[in-house]
Amino acid sequence: ADTRPPARQASLESTKADDGHAFQPTSSPQQPIPVMGIDVKSAFVMRSADDLATPFTNYTSGYKALLDYVWYQPEDLRVVKAVPVPSEQELGSYIPSPIFPSDHLAVIYDLEWTQG
């Protein structure tokens, strides 16, 4: 006999996208989600390799946002080269796809140690 507890239903309403997956239409990267009960501060001064200029790294039919980052300490490292993220036109459609098999795009930077 199955002794597992019954599955709970999601407490938030979700909507189905055209391709059938569920997404939360009210969520937005521009609206911070409050975090309570944990300390999210860091003793390190970090910088995003692209200065948060990349428009998106996730591009699905229900959601497009910058979700993937390369963080580094600018006093120790510097960005030498970046592989650009494909544009919406280059993607041609939502991902994953036969050409881009993940729903996240690769975020690639060459970093080098600074002298000092």
Image (tube, rainbow, N blue to C red):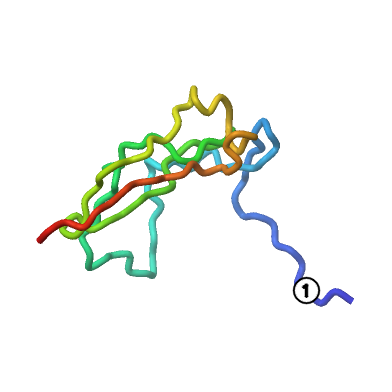
What residue appears at the point 42 percent right and 48 percent down from the top-left corner?
68
Q: Please provide percent x and percent y for residue 100.
A: 57, 37
Q: Total label count?
A: 1
Q: Please provide percent x and percent y for residue 3.
A: 81, 77
Q: Please provide percent x and percent y for residue 86.
A: 45, 31
Q: Is residue 90 left or right of residue 78?
A: right
What residue appears at the point 67 percent right and 30 percent down from the top-left corner?
18
Q: Is residue 86 left or right of residue 76?
A: right
Quadrant where the C terminus lies?
bottom left
Category of crowding for the residue at label 1, using alpha-carbon neighbours closer than 10 angstroms: few (below 14), some (14–19), many (at least 20): few
Query: Which residue is under mark 1?
Result: 4
The answer to whether residue 109 is above or below residue 35 is above
Q: In this view, which residue lies farthest toward the top?
A: 89
- Residue 103, quarter of picture: top right
Of residues 6 and 66, the one drawn nearer to the viewer in this rendering: 66
Q: Is residue 64 left or right of residue 19?
A: left
Q: In this view, which residue lies farthest toward the right?
A: 1
Quadrant where the N terminus lies?
bottom right
- Residue 31, quarter of picture: top left
Q: Please provide percent x and percent y for residue 34.
A: 38, 56
Q: Give the residue type that dot 1 points to.
A: Arg
Helix, strand or loop at disc 1? loop
Q: In this view, which residue lies farthest toward the left?
A: 116
Of residues 86 and 27, the one drawn nearer to the viewer in this rendering: 86
The answer to whether residue 6 is above or below residue 69 is below
The answer to whether residue 44 is above or below residue 101 is below
What residue appears at the point 37 percent right and 40 percent down from the top-left corner?
30
